Image (cartoon, coloured by chain):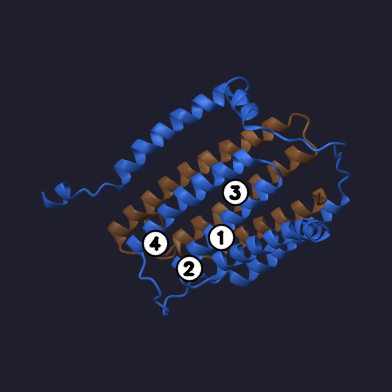
Chain colours: A blue, B brown
């Protein structure tokens, strides 16, 4: 049992490491298709973090929507548009090094601020069930909920109109 | 359970990686991938705060659900725009898409 306890303590850090590695690969790999696959690794890692934090519903939504939906969209777009693996084309613009330094400085600032802030941590950690989320969605957050429905319909129509090929107009 | 600090360090590192990618990629789909990473970092933060410090823990998770929904919708629109640009201009590199430059 002691082995299991030790593994469960180290496990979350392993998940962190894999997720961060996937993110780094997603932003630096030359081949954009490989970058999309690394993004899938990152998203699954974040879903695992949700499960560890006892947000099971969010973890399931993350896997369904991100890994099942957005990943398919991204991979479709990559396959429809890019000349995959063309090594002569540079993948980053000329701002790479200044941006890297800026991001590292921002990270340093975040770490210092997180260390300085006195967090008021509760004595017992909260666990949120899917039932509570559902009730909150249709009572407290009913207005944003309905607004999201309107936005989704608008985006559905807009996406279809944007992406449909207008060959008929080109011929005339 | 691990302390709150470690989760926050993790999510801020994830955010900074996404920021680096969003500002340095030349490929439009690469920029989209980086933006998704940044949104995920925000979600991790929301869930961590809901577990450790929130007065009403449900609210943070509802916010995270809204973020996921709108991120999916935004990705769909952005990818449709990418497809349209590719069909019209035969390129998806940000420095070659100069329709709105004078």
Q: Dot 3 corresponds to which residue?
A: B39
Q: Nearer the viewer, mark 3 or mark 1?
A: 1
Which image quadrant for residue A87?
bottom left
2 and 3 marks in contact (CB < 8 Å): no
Q: Label 1 is found on which chain of the structure?
A: A
Q: Label 3 is found on which chain of the structure?
A: B
Q: Dot 2 corresponds to which residue?
A: A34
Discs 4 and 1 lie in a common subunit: yes
- Which residue is located at x 53 percent, y 64 percent? A38
Q: Dot 4 corresponds to which residue?
A: A78
Q: Nearer the viewer, mark 2 or mark 4?
A: 2
Q: Nearer the viewer, residue A23 or A13?
A: A13
Can you see residue B98?
no
Q: Distance from label 4 to label 3 (Cα)?
A: 21 Å
- Which residue is located at x 60 percent, y 38 percent? A57
Q: Distance from label 2 to label 3 (Cα)?
A: 20 Å
Q: Nearer the viewer, mark 1 or mark 2?
A: 1
Pick whichever of labels 4 and 1 is earlier in the sequence: 1
Q: Nearer the viewer, residue B92 or A145?
A: A145
Q: Nearer the viewer, residue A128 or B61?
A: A128
4 and 1 marks in contact (CB < 8 Å): no
Q: Quadrant of the N terminus of chain A?
A: bottom right
Q: Residues within 10 Å of mark 3 (few under 14, many from 20)?
A: some
Q: Residues within 10 Å of mark 4 (few under 14, many from 20)?
A: many
């Amino acid at each position: 049992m002691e082995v299991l306890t030790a593994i469960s303590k180290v496990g979350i850090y392993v998940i962190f490491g894999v997720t961060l590695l996937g993110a780094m690969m997603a932003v630096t790999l030359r081949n954009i298709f490989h970058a999309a696959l690394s993004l899938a690794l990152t998203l699954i890692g974040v879903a695992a973090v949700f499960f560890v934090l006892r947000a099971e519903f969010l973890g399931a939504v993350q896997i369904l929507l991100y890994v099942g939906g957005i990943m398919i969209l991204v991979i479709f777009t990559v396959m429809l548009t890019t000349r995959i693996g063309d090594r002569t084309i540079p993948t980053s613009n000329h701002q790479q090094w200044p941006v890297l330094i800026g991001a590292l400085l921002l990270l340093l600032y975040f770490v210092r601020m997180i260390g300085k802030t006195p967090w008021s941590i509760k004595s017992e950690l909260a666990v949120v069930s899917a039932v509570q989320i559902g009730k909150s969605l249709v009572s407290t957050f009913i207005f944003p909920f309905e607004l999201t429905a309107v936005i989704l319909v608008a985006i559905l129509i807009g996406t279809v109109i944007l992406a449909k090929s207008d060959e008929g107009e080109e011929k005339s | 359970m691990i302390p709150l600090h470690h989760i926050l360090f993790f999510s801020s590192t994830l955010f900074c990686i996404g920021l680096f990618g969003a500002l340095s990629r030349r490929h439009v789909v690469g920029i989209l991938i980086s933006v998704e990473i940044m949104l995920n970092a925000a979600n991790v933060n929301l869930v961590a705060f809901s577990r450790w410090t929130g007065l009403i823990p449900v609210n943070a998770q509802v916010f995270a659900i809204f973020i996921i929904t709108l991120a999916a919708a935004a990705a769909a629109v952005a990818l449709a725009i990418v497809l349209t640009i590719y069909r019209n201009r035969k390129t998806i590199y940000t420095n070659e898409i100069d329709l709105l430059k004078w």
